[in-house]
Image: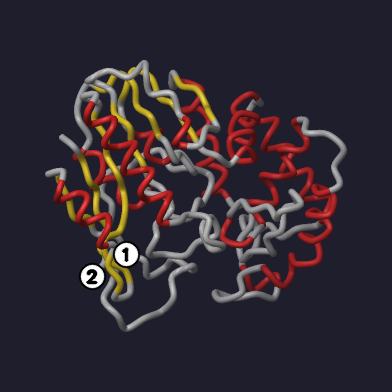
Amino acid sequence: MQRTQIKKYIASPLNYIGGKARILDQLLPLMPNDIDIFVDLFCGGCNVGMNVPSNYTIYNDTSRPLINLLKALQRMKNDTIIKGINKLIDEFEFSRTRDHDFAYYGGGANLGVSVYNREKFLKLREKFNTFPQKNSQYYIILYTLILFGFNNQLRFNEQGKFNLPVGKRDFNTTIEGKLVRFLDALRAQPHEFQTKDFRHFDFKNLTANSLVYCDPPYLLTTATYNEKSGWTLKDEHDLMEVLDSLNDCGVKFALSNVLQHEGKQNVVLLNWANQNNYNIHDLFMDYHYSNYQKKSKKPESKEVLITNY
Protein backbone atom coordinates (compact mmCIF):
# COMPACT_ATOMS: atom_id res chain seq x y z
CA MET A 1 0.00 0.00 0.00
CA GLN A 2 1.30 3.42 -0.94
CA ARG A 3 -0.27 6.80 -0.37
CA THR A 4 -0.06 10.04 -2.26
CA GLN A 5 -0.13 13.33 -0.43
CA ILE A 6 -2.83 15.52 -1.94
CA LYS A 7 -2.15 18.87 -0.33
CA LYS A 8 1.07 20.76 -0.93
CA TYR A 9 3.00 21.95 2.06
CA ILE A 10 6.24 23.85 2.56
CA ALA A 11 8.86 21.10 2.52
CA SER A 12 12.19 21.38 4.29
CA PRO A 13 15.33 21.67 2.14
CA LEU A 14 16.96 19.32 4.67
CA ASN A 15 16.32 15.59 4.39
CA TYR A 16 16.24 14.95 8.12
CA ILE A 17 15.82 11.28 9.02
CA GLY A 18 12.41 10.74 10.54
CA GLY A 19 11.10 13.95 8.97
CA LYS A 20 7.33 14.14 8.68
CA ALA A 21 6.98 15.75 5.24
CA ARG A 22 5.25 12.69 3.77
CA ILE A 23 2.58 12.44 6.48
CA LEU A 24 1.79 16.10 7.05
CA ASP A 25 -1.65 15.50 5.55
CA GLN A 26 -2.30 13.08 8.43
CA LEU A 27 -0.63 15.08 11.20
CA LEU A 28 -2.03 18.55 10.58
CA PRO A 29 -5.73 17.62 10.92
CA LEU A 30 -4.86 16.20 14.36
CA MET A 31 -3.45 19.53 15.56
CA PRO A 32 -5.74 21.89 17.51
CA ASN A 33 -6.99 25.15 16.04
CA ASP A 34 -6.00 28.65 17.19
CA ILE A 35 -2.53 27.79 18.50
CA ASP A 36 -0.82 30.77 20.10
CA ILE A 37 2.67 29.27 20.61
CA PHE A 38 3.76 26.14 18.76
CA VAL A 39 6.88 24.48 20.16
CA ASP A 40 8.64 22.11 17.75
CA LEU A 41 10.71 20.53 20.51
CA PHE A 42 12.80 18.22 18.28
CA CYS A 43 12.48 20.31 15.13
CA GLY A 44 15.00 18.58 12.84
CA GLY A 45 14.23 19.82 9.33
CA CYS A 46 11.29 21.93 10.62
CA ASN A 47 8.67 20.27 8.41
CA VAL A 48 5.99 20.28 11.09
CA GLY A 49 6.62 23.68 12.67
CA MET A 50 6.72 25.27 9.24
CA ASN A 51 3.25 24.00 8.36
CA VAL A 52 1.25 24.22 11.60
CA PRO A 53 -0.63 27.55 11.76
CA SER A 54 0.21 29.43 14.96
CA ASN A 55 0.85 32.96 16.18
CA TYR A 56 4.45 32.11 17.08
CA THR A 57 6.71 29.11 16.50
CA ILE A 58 9.70 27.99 18.54
CA TYR A 59 12.08 25.65 16.72
CA ASN A 60 14.23 23.72 19.17
CA ASP A 61 16.90 21.11 18.53
CA THR A 62 20.07 20.10 20.39
CA SER A 63 21.99 20.00 17.09
CA ARG A 64 23.78 23.35 17.10
CA PRO A 65 25.15 22.85 13.55
CA LEU A 66 21.57 22.36 12.33
CA ILE A 67 20.16 25.41 14.12
CA ASN A 68 23.12 27.61 13.19
CA LEU A 69 22.76 26.56 9.55
CA LEU A 70 19.06 27.43 9.50
CA LYS A 71 19.73 30.79 11.15
CA ALA A 72 22.54 31.57 8.71
CA LEU A 73 20.47 30.67 5.64
CA GLN A 74 17.53 32.81 6.70
CA ARG A 75 19.84 35.81 7.19
CA MET A 76 21.23 35.57 3.65
CA LYS A 77 19.46 36.52 0.46
CA ASN A 78 18.29 33.61 -1.70
CA ASP A 79 20.38 34.80 -4.65
CA THR A 80 23.49 34.94 -2.47
CA ILE A 81 22.98 31.34 -1.36
CA ILE A 82 22.23 29.99 -4.83
CA LYS A 83 25.12 31.86 -6.44
CA GLY A 84 27.42 30.61 -3.68
CA ILE A 85 26.35 27.00 -4.25
CA ASN A 86 26.77 27.27 -8.02
CA LYS A 87 30.20 28.84 -7.59
CA LEU A 88 31.31 25.83 -5.53
CA ILE A 89 29.81 23.48 -8.11
CA ASP A 90 31.87 25.17 -10.80
CA GLU A 91 35.02 25.31 -8.67
CA PHE A 92 34.92 21.62 -7.74
CA GLU A 93 33.40 20.53 -11.09
CA PHE A 94 30.42 18.71 -9.56
CA SER A 95 27.68 17.21 -11.69
CA ARG A 96 24.69 19.24 -12.86
CA THR A 97 21.78 16.87 -13.46
CA ARG A 98 19.52 19.84 -14.17
CA ASP A 99 21.45 20.03 -17.47
CA HIS A 100 22.37 16.37 -18.07
CA ASP A 101 21.02 12.98 -17.04
CA PHE A 102 22.78 10.41 -14.83
CA ALA A 103 24.15 8.55 -17.84
CA TYR A 104 26.05 11.66 -18.94
CA TYR A 105 28.05 11.35 -15.71
CA GLY A 106 28.45 7.59 -15.99
CA GLY A 107 25.77 6.85 -13.42
CA GLY A 108 22.33 5.27 -13.28
CA ALA A 109 19.29 4.89 -11.07
CA ASN A 110 21.17 3.02 -8.33
CA LEU A 111 24.42 4.99 -8.08
CA GLY A 112 23.17 8.31 -9.39
CA VAL A 113 26.17 10.65 -9.69
CA SER A 114 27.98 9.33 -6.60
CA VAL A 115 30.96 7.85 -8.47
CA TYR A 116 31.45 10.99 -10.55
CA ASN A 117 31.26 13.30 -7.53
CA ARG A 118 33.08 11.22 -4.91
CA GLU A 119 36.58 12.73 -5.13
CA LYS A 120 35.21 16.22 -5.65
CA PHE A 121 33.01 15.80 -2.59
CA LEU A 122 35.93 14.68 -0.42
CA LYS A 123 37.89 17.78 -1.46
CA LEU A 124 34.99 20.05 -0.56
CA ARG A 125 34.54 18.21 2.73
CA GLU A 126 38.20 18.77 3.56
CA LYS A 127 37.85 22.45 2.69
CA PHE A 128 34.88 22.73 5.05
CA ASN A 129 36.51 20.83 7.91
CA THR A 130 39.51 23.17 7.80
CA PHE A 131 37.58 26.38 7.12
CA PRO A 132 38.90 29.10 9.44
CA GLN A 133 35.67 30.84 10.50
CA LYS A 134 31.92 30.23 10.73
CA ASN A 135 30.81 33.00 8.39
CA SER A 136 28.29 32.98 5.53
CA GLN A 137 30.69 31.12 3.24
CA TYR A 138 31.13 28.41 5.89
CA TYR A 139 27.38 27.75 5.89
CA ILE A 140 27.10 27.84 2.10
CA ILE A 141 29.83 25.17 1.96
CA LEU A 142 28.02 23.17 4.64
CA TYR A 143 24.73 23.28 2.78
CA THR A 144 26.47 22.31 -0.47
CA LEU A 145 27.96 19.31 1.33
CA ILE A 146 24.47 18.36 2.47
CA LEU A 147 23.18 18.66 -1.10
CA PHE A 148 25.88 16.35 -2.45
CA GLY A 149 26.15 14.15 0.64
CA PHE A 150 24.61 10.82 1.58
CA ASN A 151 20.81 11.12 1.78
CA ASN A 152 21.24 14.92 2.06
CA GLN A 153 21.85 14.50 5.78
CA LEU A 154 23.81 16.42 8.39
CA ARG A 155 26.29 14.55 10.58
CA PHE A 156 29.47 15.39 12.48
CA ASN A 157 31.88 13.08 14.28
CA GLU A 158 33.09 13.49 17.86
CA GLN A 159 35.88 15.79 16.67
CA GLY A 160 33.34 18.13 15.09
CA LYS A 161 34.21 17.13 11.54
CA PHE A 162 31.54 16.66 8.88
CA ASN A 163 31.89 12.96 8.07
CA LEU A 164 29.15 11.82 5.71
CA PRO A 165 30.17 10.25 2.37
CA VAL A 166 29.04 11.39 -1.06
CA GLY A 167 25.42 10.90 -2.10
CA LYS A 168 23.60 10.05 -5.31
CA ARG A 169 22.08 13.44 -6.09
CA ASP A 170 23.10 17.04 -6.69
CA PHE A 171 21.69 20.57 -6.74
CA ASN A 172 18.77 20.13 -9.12
CA THR A 173 15.86 22.44 -9.87
CA THR A 174 13.55 20.63 -7.43
CA ILE A 175 15.77 21.17 -4.39
CA GLU A 176 16.48 24.77 -5.43
CA GLY A 177 12.76 25.49 -5.55
CA LYS A 178 12.25 23.77 -2.21
CA LEU A 179 15.04 25.83 -0.63
CA VAL A 180 13.63 29.14 -1.88
CA ARG A 181 10.04 28.35 -0.82
CA PHE A 182 11.16 27.22 2.62
CA LEU A 183 13.38 30.23 3.32
CA ASP A 184 10.73 32.69 2.10
CA ALA A 185 8.16 31.05 4.39
CA LEU A 186 10.59 30.97 7.32
CA ARG A 187 11.38 34.68 7.01
CA ALA A 188 7.65 35.47 6.94
CA GLN A 189 6.88 33.37 10.01
CA PRO A 190 7.11 34.82 13.54
CA HIS A 191 9.57 32.41 15.14
CA GLU A 192 12.75 31.84 17.10
CA PHE A 193 15.37 29.11 17.35
CA GLN A 194 16.62 27.42 20.51
CA THR A 195 19.10 24.60 21.22
CA LYS A 196 17.90 23.30 24.59
CA ASP A 197 17.83 19.75 25.83
CA PHE A 198 14.13 18.96 26.19
CA ARG A 199 14.64 18.51 29.95
CA HIS A 200 15.84 22.10 30.25
CA PHE A 201 13.41 23.81 27.88
CA ASP A 202 11.51 26.67 29.51
CA PHE A 203 7.78 26.01 29.13
CA LYS A 204 6.62 28.63 31.62
CA ASN A 205 5.25 31.10 29.05
CA LEU A 206 2.98 28.53 27.40
CA THR A 207 -0.79 28.72 27.77
CA ALA A 208 -3.77 26.41 27.33
CA ASN A 209 -3.75 27.45 23.64
CA SER A 210 -0.12 26.45 23.15
CA LEU A 211 0.99 23.14 21.67
CA VAL A 212 4.24 21.27 22.28
CA TYR A 213 4.99 18.88 19.42
CA CYS A 214 7.61 16.18 19.99
CA ASP A 215 9.25 14.05 17.33
CA PRO A 216 12.14 12.51 19.27
CA PRO A 217 14.44 9.71 18.12
CA TYR A 218 12.63 6.40 18.38
CA LEU A 219 13.78 3.58 20.65
CA LEU A 220 12.70 0.96 18.12
CA THR A 221 14.44 2.33 15.03
CA THR A 222 18.00 3.19 14.06
CA ALA A 223 19.04 6.39 12.30
CA THR A 224 22.05 8.69 12.15
CA TYR A 225 20.88 10.57 15.23
CA ASN A 226 20.43 7.55 17.51
CA GLU A 227 22.56 4.79 15.98
CA LYS A 228 25.11 5.08 18.79
CA SER A 229 22.55 4.81 21.60
CA GLY A 230 21.92 8.52 21.40
CA TRP A 231 18.37 7.97 22.65
CA THR A 232 18.01 5.68 25.65
CA LEU A 233 15.24 4.26 27.80
CA LYS A 234 16.07 6.96 30.37
CA ASP A 235 15.49 9.62 27.70
CA GLU A 236 12.15 8.00 26.92
CA HIS A 237 11.11 8.09 30.57
CA ASP A 238 12.35 11.67 30.99
CA LEU A 239 10.33 12.83 28.00
CA MET A 240 7.21 11.12 29.30
CA GLU A 241 7.70 12.94 32.61
CA VAL A 242 8.00 16.27 30.79
CA LEU A 243 4.80 15.56 28.86
CA ASP A 244 2.97 14.53 32.03
CA SER A 245 4.07 17.80 33.61
CA LEU A 246 2.72 19.76 30.64
CA ASN A 247 -0.53 17.87 30.91
CA ASP A 248 -0.78 18.72 34.61
CA CYS A 249 -0.33 22.40 33.70
CA GLY A 250 -3.08 22.27 31.10
CA VAL A 251 -0.74 22.59 28.11
CA LYS A 252 -1.48 20.50 25.03
CA PHE A 253 1.11 18.13 23.60
CA ALA A 254 1.42 15.84 20.59
CA LEU A 255 4.05 13.08 20.43
CA SER A 256 5.11 11.31 17.25
CA ASN A 257 6.52 7.82 17.76
CA VAL A 258 6.33 4.18 16.71
CA LEU A 259 4.68 1.56 18.90
CA GLN A 260 5.85 -1.36 16.77
CA HIS A 261 8.83 -1.93 14.51
CA GLU A 262 10.21 -5.17 13.00
CA GLY A 263 8.36 -7.33 15.47
CA LYS A 264 9.35 -5.26 18.52
CA GLN A 265 6.90 -3.23 20.57
CA ASN A 266 7.49 -0.15 22.69
CA VAL A 267 5.61 -1.50 25.69
CA VAL A 268 6.77 1.34 27.96
CA LEU A 269 5.29 3.97 25.67
CA LEU A 270 2.06 2.05 25.12
CA ASN A 271 1.52 1.49 28.84
CA TRP A 272 2.24 5.15 29.60
CA ALA A 273 -0.29 6.35 27.03
CA ASN A 274 -2.96 3.94 28.22
CA GLN A 275 -2.44 4.59 31.93
CA ASN A 276 -2.83 8.34 31.40
CA ASN A 277 -5.77 8.01 29.00
CA TYR A 278 -3.88 9.84 26.28
CA ASN A 279 -5.22 9.50 22.75
CA ILE A 280 -3.36 7.24 20.32
CA HIS A 281 -3.91 8.13 16.65
CA ASP A 282 -2.72 5.54 14.14
CA LEU A 283 -0.83 6.90 11.13
CA PHE A 284 0.37 5.33 7.93
CA MET A 285 4.09 5.74 7.33
CA ASP A 286 5.73 3.96 4.40
CA TYR A 287 9.36 3.22 5.29
CA HIS A 288 9.96 1.45 1.99
CA TYR A 289 12.25 4.17 0.69
CA SER A 290 14.00 4.98 3.96
CA ASN A 291 17.59 3.84 3.60
CA TYR A 292 18.17 3.50 7.32
CA GLN A 293 15.41 0.89 7.60
CA LYS A 294 16.54 -2.70 7.20
CA LYS A 295 14.61 -4.91 4.84
CA SER A 296 12.63 -7.31 6.96
CA LYS A 297 9.78 -9.80 6.62
CA LYS A 298 8.62 -8.88 10.12
CA PRO A 299 5.54 -6.70 10.63
CA GLU A 300 5.81 -3.10 9.44
CA SER A 301 6.23 -0.12 11.73
CA LYS A 302 3.17 1.25 13.48
CA GLU A 303 3.50 5.03 13.46
CA VAL A 304 1.31 6.94 15.91
CA LEU A 305 0.57 10.40 17.24
CA ILE A 306 -0.13 10.48 20.98
CA THR A 307 -2.03 13.54 22.24
CA ASN A 308 -3.51 14.75 25.53
CA TYR A 309 -6.43 16.49 23.80
Instruction: Judge left or right: residue 264 versus residue 12.
Output: left
Q: Position of residue 288 (x, y in %)?
A: 37, 70
Instruction: Judge left or right: residue 209 versus residue 177.
Output: left
Q: Is residue 214 above or below residue 280?
A: above
Task: Looking at the picture, tell me which residue is in the foreground, 246 or 255.
Answer: 246
Instruction: Judge left or right: residue 304 versus residue 114.
Output: left
**Which residue is depicted at the point 80% across and 47% down?**
128
Q: Are marks 1 and 2 in contact (CB under 8 Å)?
A: yes
Label 1: element kind: loop
Q: Position of residue 304 (x, y in %)?
A: 24, 54
Tell me the kind of residue under disc 1.
Asp
Mark 2, other Cα within 10 Å: few <14 / some 14–19 / many ≥20: few
Location of residue 111 (image quadrant): bottom right
Residue 286 image label? 1
Label 2: element kind: loop
Q: Position of residue 83 (x, y in %)?
A: 72, 37
**Which residue is depicted at the point 71% across and 38% down?**
139
Instruction: Residue under label 2, please give it.
Output: 1
Q: Is residue 120 above or below residue 192?
A: below
Tell me the kind of residue under disc 2.
Met
